[in-house]
């Protein structure tokens, strides 16, 4: 933090404005597409002006990743928590997640970051793993609640089902971006319904998972 | 092609050598991580020497994408074609695809390219769409043959099942890179078996797809 920093209110607003610009760039070019120099040009500030708010390129990338996560949770998780625990909530999460993919068809910061940092070591890799792992645990919790409610079969492994739902959303993102959203949404919703049907208590013992 | 080009045999060997280096870089950094300058340093040639083999950065990126596709087909498709049409071939494709993901855990050029170019227009975007679309058609053909054999239910939609299998492989790639390969493989194989079971002729009419 610079000792010449302006009053905290204005400072926070400027930081927020820079972050929004950075978020828009990262949607298009990924977190690796961010540079303090071109961001400074973009927002009409000096490089040192941007550095006063984000100490390094890495700090900026982490802040953008955090903003993406906050937006995802605001759009997907928190509204779904208004629904009863279990299957109703799981359906709400998937429905809102589909809407999220539609909104960020040209690039979801979280999804792109997973692809950018999966094979690298470092602070950003660790942040991506933590973010993805936290969300997977949320999914497992919701699946477990549906099992506890008797809405899904008792022998369903929550981590397995959470993996499969996540895979379907990756498939939606992939197909929506390359082949168009509408068919991809139709595929993902049909797959989700078949997956739930194969995990229903009535189907228990019928299938190999 | 330069009129000063060496004899075609040596020329082809040099091109191949440069391409292998570029492929290794793209595995780590994506096709967007390629630059003629740093590649030239890497292979101990001048920039103009590399340009004599690849007219532009984009030509180089396209050549690396093509190499990735050729390797994928060599490792996954061609061996699976040795098996009888239908379910046996579908299982062979999925098994070899899982091995492919294991080999390229730190980065598959094809997968990364899909994420890099999905939201952009241009020659590379078009090449990625063509590659992904061609492979999806191959998958549809194999699924259709399994339906024709009576190994999968007659009411299965080939494009739907091909979407779901592709999604599972994206899930494998994602989880293997972030959380470790072994659990991800266990999840994807269990999911594939359940998917096949839900598409078996015996299961027809039972589930919503």
Image (cartoon, coloured by chain):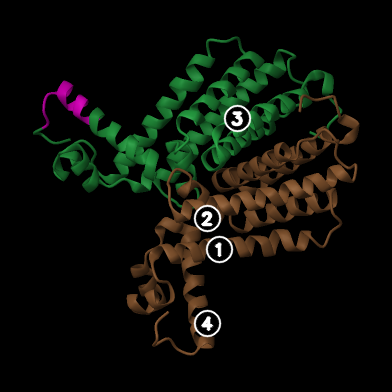
Chain colours: A green, B brown
- The mark found on residue A185 in the picture is 3
The numbered mark 3 sits on a residue in which chain? A
Residue B39 placement, left or right of B98: left
Q: Main secondary structure of the magenta part?
A: helix
Residue B148 in which image quadrant: top right
Looking at this view, is B54 or A88 the one in front?
B54
Q: Label 3 to label 1, Cα distance in Å? A: 29 Å
Q: Which badge, 1 or 2, comes first in the chain's sequence?
A: 1
Q: Label 4 to label 1, Cα distance in Å? A: 17 Å
Q: Are marks 3 and 2 in contact (CB under 8 Å)?
A: no
Please rate how many residues cluster around mark 3, counting C-alpha atoms within 10 Å: few if below 14, some from 14 to 19, many from 20.
many
Secondary structure state at the residue bearing disc 3: helix
Q: Position of residue A146 (x, y in %)?
A: 68, 17
Q: Kindly identify which residue carries mark 2.
A: B127
Q: Kindly identify which residue carries mark 1.
A: B66
Q: Are marks 3 and 1 in contact (CB under 8 Å)?
A: no
Looking at this view, is B85 or A43 the one in front?
B85
The numbered mark 2 sits on a residue in which chain? B
Judge whether residue B24 can be spotted in this image. yes
Q: Are marks 4 and 1 in contact (CB under 8 Å)?
A: no
Q: Please tell me if label 4 and label 3 are on a single chain.
A: no
Residue at left 52%, top 49%? B114
Q: Position of residue A131 (x, y in %)?
A: 47, 34
Please rate how many residues cluster around mark 2, counting C-alpha atoms within 10 Å: few if below 14, some from 14 to 19, many from 20.
some
Q: Please tell me if label 4 and label 2 are on a single chain.
A: yes
Please rate how many residues cluster around mark 4, counting C-alpha atoms within 10 Å: few if below 14, some from 14 to 19, many from 20.
few
Q: Position of residue B35 (x, y in %)?
A: 37, 64
- A192 in relation to B138, above or below: above
Please rate how many residues cluster around mark 1, counting C-alpha atoms within 10 Å: few if below 14, some from 14 to 19, many from 20.
some
Q: Kindly identify which residue carries mark 4.
A: B13
């Amino acid at each position: 933090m610079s000792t010449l920093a302006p009053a905290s209110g204005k400072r926070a607003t400027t930081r927020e404005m820079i972050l929004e610009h950075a978020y828009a760039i990262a949607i298009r070019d990924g977190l690796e597409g961010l540079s303090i120099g071109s961001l400074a040009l973009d927002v009409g500030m000096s490089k040192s002006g941007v550095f006063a708010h984000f100490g390094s390129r890495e700090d900026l990338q982490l802040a953008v990743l955090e903003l993406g996560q906050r937006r995802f949770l605001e759009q997907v998780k928190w509204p779904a928590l208004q629904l009863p625990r279990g299957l109703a909530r799981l359906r709400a999460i998937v429905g809102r997640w589909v809407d999220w993919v539609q909104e960020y068809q040209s690039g979801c910061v979280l999804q792109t970051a997973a692809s950018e940092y999966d094979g690298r070591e470092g602070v950003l890799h660790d942040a991506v793993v933590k973010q993805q792992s936290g969300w997977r645990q949320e999914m497992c919790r919701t699946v477990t609640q549906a099992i506890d409610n008797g809405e899904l079969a008792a022998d369903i492994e929550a981590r397995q089902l959470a993996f499969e739902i996540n895979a379907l959303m990756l498939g939606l993102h992939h197909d929506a971006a390359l082949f168009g959203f509408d068919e991809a949404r139709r595929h993902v919703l049909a797959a989700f319904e078949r997956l739930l049907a194969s995990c229903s208590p009535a189907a228990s013992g019928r299938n190999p998972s």
